[in-house]
Amino acid sequence: MRRQDTFPRRSFLGHSLGLGGVALTWLLHRDCVAAETTQPHFAPKAKRVLLVFCPGGVSHVDTFDYKPELEKQHGKPLGVKIDTFFGQPGNLMKSPFAFKRHGESGQWVSDLFPHLAQRVDDLTFIHSMQAKSSNHTPAGFQMLSGFTMNGFPCMGSWVSYGLGSENENLPAFVVLPDPRGLPAGGAINWTNGFLPATYQGVAFRTVGDPVPDLSTPKGISPAQRSASLQMLEQANREFLESTPGDSTIAARLRSYELAARMQLAIPEVMDLARESEETKRLYGMDRKASEAFGRNCLLARRLLERGVRFVQLFHGGAFGSPRINWDAHEDIVENHRTQAVVADKPLAGLLHDLKRRGMLDDTLVVWATEFGRTPITQGIGAPGRDHHPQAFTVWLAGAGLKRGYSHGKTDDFGFLVAENPTSIYDLHATVLHLLGIEHTKMTYYHNGIRRRLTDVHGEVVQPIMV
């Protein structure tokens, strides 16, 4: 006789305690493990981040930090000895761009940004930023990774390490380089550093296939493709078993799995045909100068709304040409006019689009550059400005921030910080805080040191928060 507390095989397979239950248990376990490893330290204000980085050094005194005293003292010496990057200190130069107050908050914005000026009541300015280096590449590394040396994990890698992804079909950390060229250092600007390789930023190309080699080559049948991938997976798994602890191989296996899912997800994300013509115009895609950057801004929104945790959007490419980044040594007017025409309408459209979709309530937008530019000319009578890490401006928008608000001040010439000096460590600590992460607690053990994004520094900039 069959015992009544046993199950026939077929009943067992269909019962909640059978294979279905096993599968359910595994799924729940996976979600629980993910929750444990990606749990914020406290309730976050932001779920995702868009970092807009402008290589070259945007001049604060020509964009968002109005200095009427520069107009009064135009052409006169600064009055103090200054060691500039190129060692060619000139005289004070007033901004060649007209400033006006905008919005209910009355924020100052120059005529470089007529569209962005209409969004100032959504912006939070920090006018007292300071960087450690006056050299583009290490200063850029510091803004993106917290360190002036290369090889340290970028902020996007830290965020994806701490919080994971909301969409298993897309990377947690996506990079959209400027179509005109990569920034100095290339992929170092989105490296995972010593974090596991799975947290490396994934750079999308804006021309041709967004991810190289993602699609099956022509002439290869689905069966051939599947067989080759299975053989490769087996080889990688065997190698992984022989070299335990090698995160590179484990990440490679995960990347192949992700790539298979991305083959379906990426074409949908990159297809802008379903976007209305009104939306495309909003992003400046109806203008030749701003079309490419506007497309990237629109792609950034589409990635964010599909669960990508961190999007790093570049406006500016490699150095050597003043027309493809914000490096204004030769002529501040020509350089900044050229760059602002590219960026102004797309950025304003992006902010407007995020707000009307309700996404600005839980998305953090950070606009940054590596340093500012001197209030004096580079050379007597010259029309350009040199590097200036002692004081510059960044702005933020979105979740958890006081809108239409300014923090910190520079002196009458925009030369030195006069109130509330803010380091890049402080900025990074604030970004993590808005994501629900205590920056001193998110660490990774490497070469005998508990490393973190903010090194041993950083204070959350509380006054800018609601």
Image (cartoon, grey):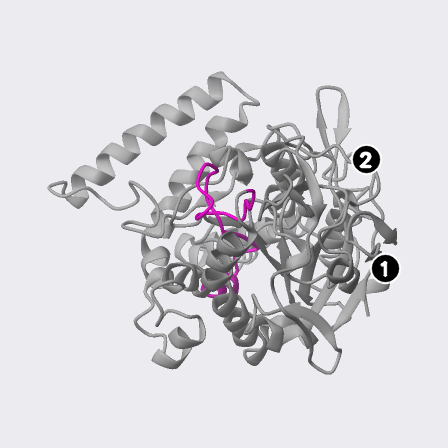
Q: Is residue 448 above or below residue 418?
A: above
Tell me the chief SS of the magenta region: loop
The picture places residue 222, in percent across and down from the top left corner, at 18, 45
Q: Residue at image x 53%, y 56%?
A: 333
Name the foreground residue: 354 vs 214.
354
Magenta region, residue range: 301-329
Residue type at mark 1: give it. Gln
Task: Name the front one of labels 2 and 1.
Answer: 2
Residue 260 visible? The answer is: yes
Mark 2, residues whose alpha carbon is within 10 Å: few (<14), some, or many (≥20)? few
Position of 386 compared to 277: left or right?
A: right
**Residue at which label 1 appears:** 462
Residue type at mark 2: give it. Lys
- Mark 2 element type: loop
Q: Furthest residue to the right?
A: 419
The picture places residue 294, in percent across and down from the top left corner, at 42, 64
In which quarter of the view is residue 253 placed?
top left
Task: Return the disc, 2 or 1, that comes first in the chain's sequence.
Answer: 2
Callout 2–callout 1 Cβ contact below 8 Å:
no
